[in-house]
Image (tube, rainbow, N blue to C red):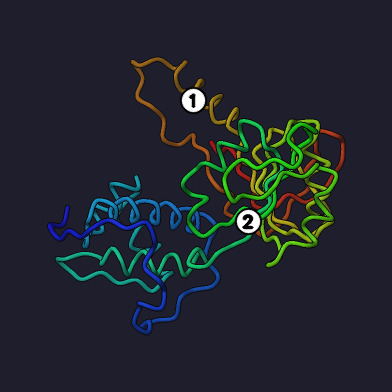
Amino acid sequence: MGADRQKSGDADPPASALPPPAATVATDIPAPTVARLATYLHVLRSFSQRGVLVASSGELATAAGVNPAILRKDLSYVAANGVRGVGYDVGRLTARISMTLHTDSIHTVALAGAGQLGRALLAHTGFGRGFRVAAMFDADPALTGTSLEVGGPRIAPLTDIAAVCAEVEPAVEIGVVATADDDARPAFDAFVGAGVRQVLNVTPVALTTEADVVVRQVDLALELQVLTFQASRGSAQAPRNDLKISSRSDVGAPREVKAADGRHGKAMGEETVTA
């Protein structure tokens, strides 16, 4: 790892600290590259917290679990060029990727589900970087009017999603569905009806709609099932690297799927298992 060190900080370097880019940042970036850029950003933040100022492509690639050639190609989309024999400036590269992923500004989030999963998401450090939970909802009447953290939003009933989201300023950009399975569809429909066009679904329920809405599905049970399959192969066998959870390469091109309730609709940006 590079020898240059600095004091760690919680905030990403602001995009305004960057010099004018020598090349234009690409706007049409493949979905797998976007997912890897998010991983690189996580790695860079951990480097920064350890005081690392400069990192080579090999060090970044190893920490991110990718090939250095893939990393360099991915970084070309954000107009980031390292110095041969030296590496990448961690602060500048963090700011460059943050600017590309739009995490250098605050995005408003509404969270449906204040149970254990919702609380875990709220407590996750990732929510503190570029995201503000402005509204929370739950089906439990006992939680109505309470708050999970000092200064946080008061929990409203799931039936109030549309009304509350309409009053949030700035407007809710991302809705998170972390409810019980039976409440997932009503919560999702309410978000869509309120004009929310980006939804993170962490329930096992398939959520689809005819509207132009991007849905990201994160099914923890599915992930565990894949790992169970890998474990069942036995330690004597070398692990397969071709069976993995990956983002669809055709995000943005909706496909027809059938939901658990029998509906057909468009699914965009889903997580899928590829073999």
Contact? badges 2 and 1 (CB < 8 Å): no
Mark 2 secondary-structure assignment: loop
- Please name the amino acid that badge 1 sits on: Leu
- Residue 211, by quadrant, is bottom right
Residue 214 x/y as whole percent: 69, 55
Question: Which residue was labeled with disc 2?
Answer: 251
Question: Residue 227, labelled with which disc?
Answer: 1
| Crowdedness near tag 1: few (<14), some (14–19) or many (≥20) residues, C-alpha within 10 Å | few
Give the answer, above or below, for where 203 lies relative to 172.
above
Residue, far left: 3
Residue 203 x/y as whole percent: 68, 35
Q: Would you say 77 lies left or right of 5 here?
A: right
Q: Residue at x 60, y 27 (%)?
A: 221
Mark 1 secondary-structure assignment: helix
| Crowdedness near tag 2: few (<14), some (14–19) or many (≥20) residues, C-alpha within 10 Å | some
Q: Nearer the viewer, residue 165 or 237?
A: 165
Q: Would you say 253 lies left or right of 2 here?
A: right
Q: Earlier in the sequence, mark 2 or mark 1?
A: 1
Residue 126 x/y as whole percent: 48, 49
Q: Nearer the viewer, residue 269 or 194?
A: 194
- Please name the amino acid that badge 2 sits on: Val
